[in-house]
Amino acid sequence: MRRTGGRAVVRLRTMADSEQKQRRIIDSGHSKESDAGLGCCGWILVLVSFFFTILTFPVSVWMCIKIVKEYERAIIFRLGRILRGGAKGPGLFFVLPCTDSFIKVDMRTISFDIPPQEILTKDSVTVSVDGVVYYRVQNATLAVANITNADSATRLLAQTTLRNVLGTKNLSQILSDREEIAHNMQSTLDVATDDWGIKVERVEIKDVKLPVQLQRAMAAEAEAAREARAKVIAAEGEMNASRALKEASIVISESPAALQLRYLQTLTTIAAEKNSTIIFPLPIDMLHGILGRK
């Protein structure tokens, strides 16, 4: 089993590496095609733009030099095509004022709340569930070129994934297996957003709201279970106490003086609690004599 598991892991790694290599080849191919596909008119426009930039050098510097922060990347489009090299930054980069345009992409981790979703569980119970998703842009080029709005698409996908995953669970599983549900949602979202250049880092289930009637029923069930458990514990305590009293009676019956000592101890306890009470003890032998005559 270990050998097969290790072979499966190796196969998955090799498949992932091959997919990454294919993506790199595809990206480089697109970039080469973008540079080579400008055509004669495109190159003429680029040369004219570069010529005017040189002519207006003192002023054009402020239009050509752009700055990208440490947590940002810039995707440069030249005549509508992405330049070779993909995302630029952080730091300074150069653009032509007339032919180039760029889009900034934030590479930091972004978090958003999943709105409360009314979900019908597998055992036909309606619950309201909300959660939190943490994601970041892993590939800025894919996030810009493959989808219109990556943030909005990820939010909508998280809502539908929450419905689909929880719709296959019972109410008890939703209440007890939150970590497993969050892990399943994360893996599902990560696979779906991989083509968008987005990495889903973490998914958490915040709150599960139950109907009021169901809450009352569950509270009544829990109260009944606790009362039954309390009665069982009380019965066990009485049984243990009766056994201890039986053993004590056997010890006292073996030694007549033990009963007198117990009697005196009881008098001491009563005298300590109620000092105004006067008790006249009777000898135990007298009681034995009376009982013997009868």
Image (cartoon, grey):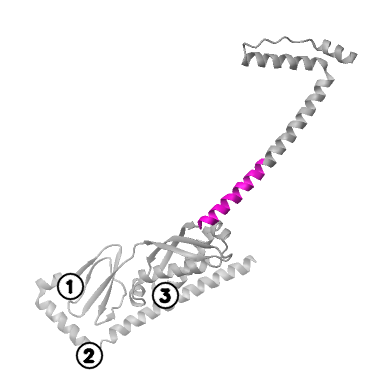
Q: Kindly identify the amino acid type of the residue bearing the numbered disc 1.
A: Cys
Q: In percent of the image, x 57 and y 54: which residue is there?
A: 217
Q: Position of residue 183 (x, y in %)?
A: 50, 62
Whether residue 203 is visible, yes or no, is: no
- Return the x and y of residue 281 as percentages of the image width and height: 74, 10
Question: Which of the numbered marks, if any, corresponds to residue 195?
Answer: 3
**Mark 2 is on which residue type?**
Cys
Q: Earlier in the sequence, mark 2 or mark 3?
A: 2
* SS for callout 1: helix
**Magenta segment main secondary structure:** helix
Quarter of the image for the C terminus: give it.
top right
Residue 64's disc is: 1
21 to the left or right of 87: right
224 is within the stretch colored magenta? yes
Which quadrant of the figure has residue 293?
top right
User: Reading the chain from its start, which is encountered first: label 2 or label 1?
Assistant: 2
**Magenta extent:** 211-230
Q: Residue at x 80, y 24 (%)?
A: 249
Q: Are marks 2 and 3 in contact (CB under 8 Å)?
A: no
Q: Nearer the viewer, residue 107 or 53?
A: 107
Above or below residue 129? Residue 245 is above
Taking the spot 55% from the left edge, 65% from the top edge, the residue there is 121
Q: Which residue is mark 2?
A: 40
Q: Quadrant of residue 285?
A: top right
